[in-house]
Image: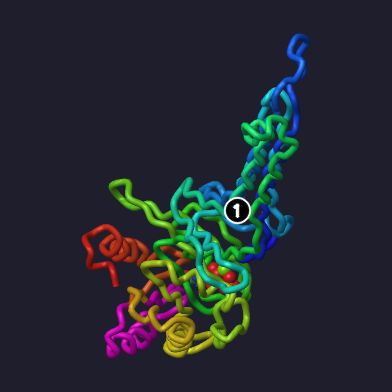
């Protein structure tokens, strides 16, 4: 099943029910007055953030969300029933935009946060409201008001504290599975991971953070190459970025990998350059200590924060967690 993180959809609130034209009929009341009740209000459409959902998959099968109309009023001053609301549940981190202008309408980030996307139409007034001294038997009633309707766009930006980025096959999924209970597919070929994956990393003292594996970044991703373009937006919300590099250089020189990642980020959104980040030189279990020293020298010279790790053996991961904890949980220095 594919991961859906954007969709266009239509919302229509219920119309208000018609007001009723009716007159009292009772045995000993020869000319009963008007007693037509009001129409019920149409149901509204709400969009609500729910932590149970992870993707916008529901939008793959459904693009129209329509609330029920109010019932018409009835005689004996009976009001029509309200139309039932329609509540669209979306994951935390969903951004709702106007489909035509692209303007951001609401960012649903908190559990239970609700947005009224289309207001139900008011019910029409029944003829009881129209009686007057000159017109004691009004034969008029309001029609209900139509419910609001519009086209909206929804985009999901994962809410993760830490994002893993790296070229295909660098070991991102292996690292995610090492640091969290997530169980992503790991395989010795590029583009194994096709959808962003989340995992929870637990620290001492009960603290935790959410780690996201953001797949598919390759050179040119910002311009639409590979899958990267589709997923780069997810890095915008993370506080920390971890660059996972295959330090063995079997596929590409680690320094070159680093440049590609930095360049893609900068091209996608220049603000990302201020984001805290750490370079992880991965797969060092496959390298001799001399070779590791040679690769790290380059990052040292350039004064780029880096760590030597092996996602496979777990080497260096305690140091990584310490570094993360310091930024995430200690004061404000982590905020870039
Ligand atoms: N020896 C060794 N192999 C590793 C290490 N980390 C990852 N690998 C291997 O490298 C290959 C790719 O790992 P993945 O975790 O699937 O890489 P990825 O970055 O998620 O790749 P994509 O999802 O394709 O972008 C797998 O065969 C892993 O077993 C490591 O530290 N040491
Ligand atoms: Mg992967």
Within 10 Å of disc 1 (Cα), the crowding (few <14, some 14-19, many 20+) is many
Quadrant placement of the N terminus: bottom right
The image quadrant where one finds ligand 2 is bottom right
Name the one closer to the observer, 10 or 2: 10
Residue 118, above or below 95: above
Q: Residue at x 22, y 67 (%)?
A: 333
Comparing 32 with 171, the one in front is 32
Residue 153 appearing in the image: yes
Q: Which residue corresponds to the image point at 69% horizontal and 52% vertical from the top-left?
A: 65
Secondary element at image label 1: strand
On-image quarter of the C terminus:
bottom left
In the rendered structure, does residue 195 fall within the stretch colored magenta?
no
Q: Position of residue 100 (x, y in %)?
A: 62, 72
Display coloring: rainbow
Q: Can residue 57 be seen at all in this image of the molecule? A: no
Residue 133's quadrant in the figure? Answer: top right
Q: Residue at x 38, y 86 (%)?
A: 295
Name the residue: 48% across, 82% down. 268
Residue 290 is left or right of residue 148, and the answer is left
Q: Is mark 1 within 8 Å of ligand 2?
A: no
Give the percent coordinates (x, y) of residue 116: 54, 51
Where residue 166 appears, as percent x and y from the top left, is: 49, 77
Q: Is residue 301 magenta?
A: yes
Nearer to the camera, 197 or 60:
60
* Residue labelled with disc 1: 118
Of residues 306 and 231, which is closer to you in this image? Answer: 231
Up-down relation of residue 96 to residue 246 (above or below): above
Magenta extent: 279-305
Residue 220: where, in percent of width, then height? 56, 87
């Amino acid at each position: 099943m594919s991961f859906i993180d954007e969709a266009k959809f239509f919302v229509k609130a219920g119309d208000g029910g018609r007001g009723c034209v009716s007159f009292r009929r009772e045995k000993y009341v020869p000319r009963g007055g008007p007693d037509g009740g009001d129409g019920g209000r149409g149901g509204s459409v709400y969009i609500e953030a729910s932590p149970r959902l992870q993707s916008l998959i529901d939008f793959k099968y459904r693009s129209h969300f329509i609330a029920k109309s109010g019932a018409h009023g009835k005689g004996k001053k009976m009001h029509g029933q309200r139309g039932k609301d329609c509540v669209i549940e979306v994951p935390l981190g969903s951004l709702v935009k106007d489909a035509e202008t692209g303007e951001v309408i609401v960012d649903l980030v908190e559990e239970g946060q609700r947005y009224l996307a289309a207001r139900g139409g008011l019910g029409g007034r029944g003829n009881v409201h129209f009686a007057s001294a000159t017109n004691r038997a009004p034969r008029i009633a309001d029609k209900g008001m139509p419910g609001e309707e519009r086209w909206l766009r929804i985009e999901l930006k994962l809410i993760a504290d830490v994002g893993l980025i790296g070229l295909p096959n660098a070991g991102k999924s292996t690292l995610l599975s090492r640091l969290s209970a997530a169980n992503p597919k790991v395989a010795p070929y590029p583009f194994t991971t096709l959808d962003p994956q989340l995992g929870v990393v637990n620290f001492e003292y009960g603290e935790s953070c959410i780690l996201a594996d953001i797949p598919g970044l390759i050179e040119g991703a910002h311009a639409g190459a590979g899958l990267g373009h589709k997923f780069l937006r997810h890095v915008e919300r993370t506080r920390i970025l971890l660059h996972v590099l295959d330090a063995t250089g079997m596929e590409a020189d680690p320094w070159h990998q680093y440049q590609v990642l930095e360049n893609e980020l900068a091209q996608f959104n220049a603000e990302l350059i201020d984001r805290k980040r750490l370079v992880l030189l991965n797969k060092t279990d496959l390298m001799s200590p001399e070779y590791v020293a040679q690769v790290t020298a380059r990052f040292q010279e350039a004064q780029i924060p880096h760590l030597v790790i092996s996602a496979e053996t777990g080497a260096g991961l305690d140091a990584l967690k310490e570094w993360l904890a310091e930024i995430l949980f200690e004061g404000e220095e982590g905020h870039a």
